[in-house]
Image (tube, rainbow, N blue to C red):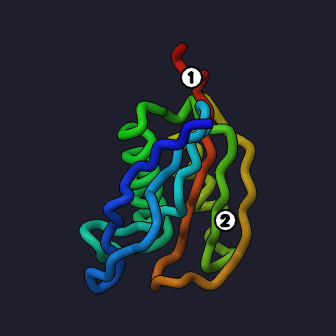
Amino acid sequence: MSLKRYGVEGGKGTGGQHLPFARAVEADGWLYVSGQVPMVDGEVISGGIVAQSHQAIKNLFAILADAGYSAEHVVRCGVWLDDPRDFQSFNGVFRQYFGEHPPARACVVSSMVVDCKVEIDCVAYKAPVK
């Protein structure tokens, strides 16, 4: 099995802290994307669940695109919400990005490591080119 790592130089977290993990890892057509929060240039954006959901998903899609994948390749998403009352609002944003290609999904309520309202990761699959 061959592995290809994306973003191994490490991203920047809150306060410019170096993040010691790959943004994504590809293995035989499977792409595992690390959890994405609503950060831009190492800082969580301001705004409520709608704005933060858009940014987290845009960050996820940027990694997918960098690896040559798109929404139609996403098999499963994991979602963490800080507040259960944000569930319906998050679903509205999620539907805008995955409406035609809904993946399997789990959504839980959890306190976050950074001060944000949402985190999302995914697993995508695209048949390897032979």
Total number of numbered labels? 2
The picture places residue 13, in percent across and down from the top left corner, at 35, 76
Q: Can residue 99 be seen in this view?
A: no
Label 1 vs 2, first from the N-terminus: 2
Residue 102 located left or right of residue 44: right
Image height check: is 69 above or below 61?
A: above
Residue 2 located left or right of residue 114: right
Other residues around mark 2 within 10 Å, as few (<14) / some (14–19) / many (≥20): some
Image height check: is 22 above or below 82?
A: above
Residue 86 located left or right of residue 49: right
Residue at the image point whose x is 54% and y is 63% from the top: 35
Residue at the image point whose x is 30% and y is 76% from the top: 43
- For the residues labelled 1 and 2, the Cα–Cα distance comes to 35 Å
Image quadrant occupied by the N terminus: top right
Depth check: give the residue in front, 95 or 34. Answer: 34
**Disc 2: which residue:** 87
Depth check: give the residue in front, 52 or 75. Answer: 75
Residue at the image point whose x is 48% and y is 52% from the top: 24
The picture places residue 2, in percent across and down from the top left corner, at 56, 37
Residue 33 located left or right of residue 58: right
Q: Nearer the viewer, mark 1 or mark 2?
A: 1
The picture places residue 55, in percent across and down from the top left corner, at 39, 59
State the image quarter where residue 80 is shown.
bottom right
**Disc 1: which residue:** 128
State the image quarter where residue 100 is shown.
top right
Image quadrant occupied by the C terminus: top right
Three-letter residue code for mark 2:
Phe
